[in-house]
Image: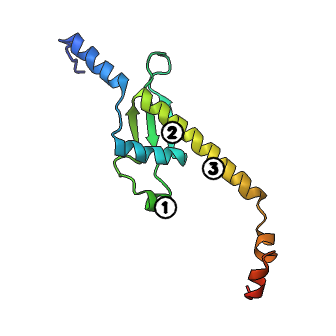
Amino acid sequence: MKSIKITNLGAIRNELNKYRQGKKFDLGQFNQVARLAWLGKVVFQPLDPEDPECASMLLYVDQPGELEGHILDTDQDLVGQMHLVDGEQAKALIRILRQGVEERAALYQELRQKDFYFKQFYQSDPAADADGE
């Protein structure tokens, strides 16, 4: 078994602190990940759940569906991978995820109550009846 000699403990601590702080997405990457978060295509995991000072999160960005991927045009280096995100951006993405779930749930609730039949077959507009529609 090989052993690694530690020569500079301060450098190792600095590297560990950089790792624990996470990485910020640039503007374009954040917008792409935020769109996928709104669609519910992300999963979060605290980097160190036992440390209350560590706000960084592990973020998995799932592949978008076929229609979503065609419309959104996401970078392939973002999707299907794990990312280490700093706490500030992670909290913002969590808020976006929550907002997307609430808005989609409201849409589905409205869709559940919508009556398409009467709107399509019983129009009360006399001009539409005169046109033969």
Horizontal placement of 53 versus 20: left or right?
right
- Of pointers 3 and 1, the one earlier in the residue sequence: 1
Q: CA distance from mark 2 to mark 1?
A: 19 Å
Q: CA distance from mark 3 to mark 2?
A: 17 Å
**Residue type pointed to by label 3:** Arg
Horizontal placement of 73 versus 118: left or right?
left
Q: Nearer the viewer, residue 62 or 91?
A: 91
Q: Is residue 73 above or below residue 95?
A: below
Residue depicted at 39% across the width and 37% down the height: 83
Question: Is label 2 in a helix, a strand or a loop?
Answer: strand
Residue depicted at 35% across the width and 33% down the height: 24
Residue that label 1 marks: 66
Q: Position of residue 130 (x, y in %)?
A: 77, 87
Q: Are marks 3 and 2 in contact (CB under 8 Å)?
A: no
How many residues crowd around disc 2 within 10 Å: few (fewer than 14), some, or many (20 or more)? Answer: some
Residue that label 2 marks: 43
- Of pointers 3 and 2, the one earlier in the residue sequence: 2
Residue depicted at 45% across the width and 40% down the height: 60
How many residues crowd around disc 1 within 10 Å: few (fewer than 14), some, or many (20 or more)? Answer: few
Residue that label 3 marks: 104
Q: Nearer the viewer, residue 17 or 5?
A: 17
Q: Position of residue 71 (x, y in %)?
A: 45, 61
Q: Is residue 97 above or below residue 66?
A: above
Q: Quadrant of the N terminus?
A: top left
**Residue type pointed to by label 1:** Glu
Q: Quadrant of the C terminus?
A: bottom right
Question: Is label 3 in a helix, a strand or a loop?
Answer: helix
